[in-house]
Amino acid sequence: MKIARLVTPVLIPLLLISCSVGRRVVPQSDIDAYEVGEETFGTKILLAARDSDFKVEVARGIGEALRDRPVYVKFIGIDQLEKEDAAEYSAIIVMTKCIAWGLDPEAESFLRKNPELSNIIVLITSGGGDWKPDMEGRKFDAVTSASVMENVDGITEEILEKLYAIIDS
Protein backbone atom coordinates (compact mmCIF):
# COMPACT_ATOMS: atom_id res chain seq x y z
CA MET A 1 0.00 0.00 0.00
CA LYS A 2 2.81 2.43 0.86
CA ILE A 3 4.59 1.65 -2.40
CA ALA A 4 1.43 2.31 -4.43
CA ARG A 5 1.01 5.71 -2.77
CA LEU A 6 4.61 6.57 -3.55
CA VAL A 7 4.74 5.18 -7.09
CA THR A 8 1.37 6.47 -8.37
CA PRO A 9 2.27 10.20 -8.18
CA VAL A 10 5.41 9.45 -10.20
CA LEU A 11 3.99 7.01 -12.76
CA ILE A 12 0.96 9.02 -13.85
CA PRO A 13 2.95 12.16 -14.81
CA LEU A 14 5.57 9.98 -16.54
CA LEU A 15 2.87 8.26 -18.59
CA LEU A 16 1.31 11.58 -19.59
CA ILE A 17 4.67 13.07 -20.50
CA SER A 18 5.62 10.02 -22.58
CA CYS A 19 2.43 10.33 -24.64
CA SER A 20 2.92 14.02 -25.39
CA VAL A 21 6.60 13.48 -26.15
CA GLY A 22 5.60 10.82 -28.68
CA ARG A 23 3.44 13.34 -30.54
CA ARG A 24 6.33 15.79 -30.72
CA VAL A 25 9.19 13.41 -31.44
CA VAL A 26 7.73 11.07 -34.08
CA PRO A 27 8.98 12.47 -37.39
CA GLN A 28 6.24 13.08 -39.94
CA SER A 29 6.54 14.19 -43.51
CA ASP A 30 3.99 16.18 -45.46
CA ILE A 31 2.40 15.70 -48.86
CA ASP A 32 3.88 17.64 -51.76
CA ALA A 33 2.16 20.96 -52.40
CA TYR A 34 0.10 21.39 -55.58
CA GLU A 35 -3.06 23.07 -56.82
CA VAL A 36 -6.18 22.10 -58.76
CA GLY A 37 -8.35 24.71 -60.48
CA GLU A 38 -7.92 28.44 -60.84
CA GLU A 39 -7.12 30.66 -57.88
CA THR A 40 -9.64 33.16 -59.27
CA PHE A 41 -12.58 30.81 -58.59
CA GLY A 42 -14.86 31.98 -55.79
CA THR A 43 -14.87 28.63 -53.99
CA LYS A 44 -11.49 27.92 -52.41
CA ILE A 45 -10.64 24.71 -50.59
CA LEU A 46 -7.55 24.05 -48.52
CA LEU A 47 -6.41 20.45 -48.08
CA ALA A 48 -3.53 19.87 -45.66
CA ALA A 49 -2.17 16.38 -45.13
CA ARG A 50 0.64 14.29 -43.75
CA ASP A 51 2.33 12.03 -46.26
CA SER A 52 1.20 8.42 -46.33
CA ASP A 53 0.06 6.24 -49.21
CA PHE A 54 -3.46 6.27 -47.79
CA LYS A 55 -3.72 10.05 -47.35
CA VAL A 56 -2.08 10.75 -50.72
CA GLU A 57 -4.69 8.54 -52.43
CA VAL A 58 -7.58 10.17 -50.57
CA ALA A 59 -6.23 13.62 -51.51
CA ARG A 60 -5.80 12.52 -55.14
CA GLY A 61 -9.37 11.24 -55.23
CA ILE A 62 -10.70 14.51 -53.83
CA GLY A 63 -8.68 16.49 -56.39
CA GLU A 64 -9.96 14.31 -59.23
CA ALA A 65 -13.58 14.67 -58.09
CA LEU A 66 -13.26 18.47 -57.94
CA ARG A 67 -11.24 18.92 -61.16
CA ASP A 68 -14.32 19.64 -63.31
CA ARG A 69 -15.98 21.97 -60.80
CA PRO A 70 -15.35 25.72 -60.57
CA VAL A 71 -13.30 25.40 -57.38
CA TYR A 72 -9.71 26.08 -56.45
CA VAL A 73 -8.05 23.46 -54.25
CA LYS A 74 -4.72 24.13 -52.58
CA PHE A 75 -2.90 21.02 -51.32
CA ILE A 76 -0.28 21.61 -48.63
CA GLY A 77 1.45 19.80 -45.81
CA ILE A 78 0.29 20.04 -42.20
CA ASP A 79 3.44 21.99 -41.33
CA GLN A 80 2.30 24.81 -43.66
CA LEU A 81 -1.11 25.21 -41.94
CA GLU A 82 0.18 27.90 -39.58
CA LYS A 83 0.87 30.17 -42.58
CA GLU A 84 -2.70 29.93 -43.91
CA ASP A 85 -5.59 32.25 -43.11
CA ALA A 86 -8.55 29.92 -42.57
CA ALA A 87 -11.00 32.75 -43.34
CA GLU A 88 -9.83 32.76 -46.99
CA TYR A 89 -11.25 29.30 -47.65
CA SER A 90 -14.79 28.04 -48.22
CA ALA A 91 -13.79 24.68 -46.76
CA ILE A 92 -10.72 23.12 -45.16
CA ILE A 93 -9.75 19.45 -45.05
CA VAL A 94 -7.05 18.34 -42.61
CA MET A 95 -5.74 14.78 -42.92
CA THR A 96 -3.58 13.62 -40.03
CA LYS A 97 -3.11 10.66 -37.75
CA CYS A 98 -3.53 9.82 -34.11
CA ILE A 99 -0.18 9.76 -32.34
CA ALA A 100 -0.05 8.59 -28.73
CA TRP A 101 -3.80 9.13 -28.29
CA GLY A 102 -3.76 12.68 -29.64
CA LEU A 103 -3.57 14.77 -32.79
CA ASP A 104 -0.19 15.83 -34.04
CA PRO A 105 0.72 19.23 -32.55
CA GLU A 106 0.51 21.26 -35.78
CA ALA A 107 -2.99 20.00 -36.64
CA GLU A 108 -4.11 20.51 -33.04
CA SER A 109 -2.72 24.05 -33.03
CA PHE A 110 -4.59 24.92 -36.23
CA LEU A 111 -7.87 23.56 -34.88
CA ARG A 112 -7.43 25.44 -31.59
CA LYS A 113 -6.80 28.70 -33.48
CA ASN A 114 -10.04 28.21 -35.45
CA PRO A 115 -12.58 26.75 -32.97
CA GLU A 116 -15.61 28.56 -34.40
CA LEU A 117 -15.19 27.47 -38.01
CA SER A 118 -17.72 24.86 -39.05
CA ASN A 119 -16.20 24.45 -42.52
CA ILE A 120 -13.36 22.16 -41.38
CA ILE A 121 -13.31 18.42 -42.04
CA VAL A 122 -10.63 16.39 -40.27
CA LEU A 123 -9.61 12.89 -41.36
CA ILE A 124 -7.85 11.11 -38.52
CA THR A 125 -6.21 7.78 -39.17
CA SER A 126 -5.42 5.42 -36.34
CA GLY A 127 -4.62 1.76 -35.91
CA GLY A 128 -8.21 0.68 -35.37
CA GLY A 129 -9.70 3.60 -37.25
CA ASP A 130 -12.03 4.62 -34.46
CA TRP A 131 -10.13 7.24 -32.42
CA LYS A 132 -11.72 10.71 -32.36
CA PRO A 133 -10.34 13.78 -30.64
CA ASP A 134 -12.14 15.58 -27.88
CA MET A 135 -14.10 18.29 -29.70
CA GLU A 136 -13.76 20.68 -26.72
CA GLY A 137 -16.48 22.96 -28.10
CA ARG A 138 -14.91 23.08 -31.55
CA LYS A 139 -17.12 22.76 -34.61
CA PHE A 140 -15.02 20.71 -37.03
CA ASP A 141 -16.36 17.48 -38.51
CA ALA A 142 -14.22 14.39 -37.84
CA VAL A 143 -13.91 11.34 -40.07
CA THR A 144 -11.93 8.36 -38.77
CA SER A 145 -10.33 5.43 -40.53
CA ALA A 146 -7.54 2.93 -40.36
CA SER A 147 -4.97 3.48 -43.13
CA VAL A 148 -6.21 0.53 -45.16
CA MET A 149 -5.92 1.04 -48.91
CA GLU A 150 -9.20 -0.82 -49.53
CA ASN A 151 -10.94 1.99 -47.57
CA VAL A 152 -9.65 4.84 -49.79
CA ASP A 153 -12.71 5.10 -52.03
CA GLY A 154 -15.20 4.96 -49.15
CA ILE A 155 -13.34 7.56 -47.08
CA THR A 156 -12.90 9.79 -50.13
CA GLU A 157 -16.66 9.63 -50.77
CA GLU A 158 -17.45 10.34 -47.11
CA ILE A 159 -15.21 13.42 -47.13
CA LEU A 160 -16.63 14.59 -50.47
CA GLU A 161 -20.21 14.30 -49.14
CA LYS A 162 -19.28 16.50 -46.18
CA LEU A 163 -17.37 18.88 -48.45
CA TYR A 164 -20.28 19.24 -50.91
CA ALA A 165 -22.62 19.97 -47.98
CA ILE A 166 -20.34 22.89 -47.08
CA ILE A 167 -19.55 24.35 -50.50
CA ASP A 168 -22.94 23.74 -52.19
CA SER A 169 -25.01 25.33 -49.43
Image (spheres, grey):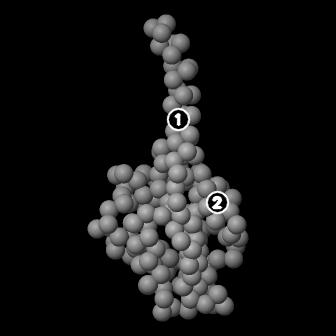
> Residue 40: which quarter of the image?
bottom right
For the residue pair 25 and 134, the one nearer the viewer reads as 25
From the viewer's perspective, tell me whether residue 136 is left or right of residue 2.
Answer: right
**Which amino acid, by three-letter code, is at mark 1?**
Ser
First along the sequence among labels 2 and 1? 1
Where is residue 132? Give x, y as percent. 46, 53
**Which amino acid, by three-letter code, is at mark 2?**
Phe
- Residue of label 1: 18
Instruction: Quote the CA–CA distance across marks 2 and 1.
Output: 23 Å
- Residue 138, numbered circle: none
Against 11, residue 105 (above or below) is below
Classed neighbour count for the residue bearing mark 2: other residues with Cα under 10 Å, few (<14), some (14–19), many (≥20): some
Where is residue 112? Give x, y as percent. 65, 56
Which residue appears at 50% of the width and 76% of the height?
163
- Residue of label 2: 110
From the viewer's perspective, tell me whether residue 117 is left or right of residue 36.
Answer: right
Against 71, residue 118 (above or below) is above
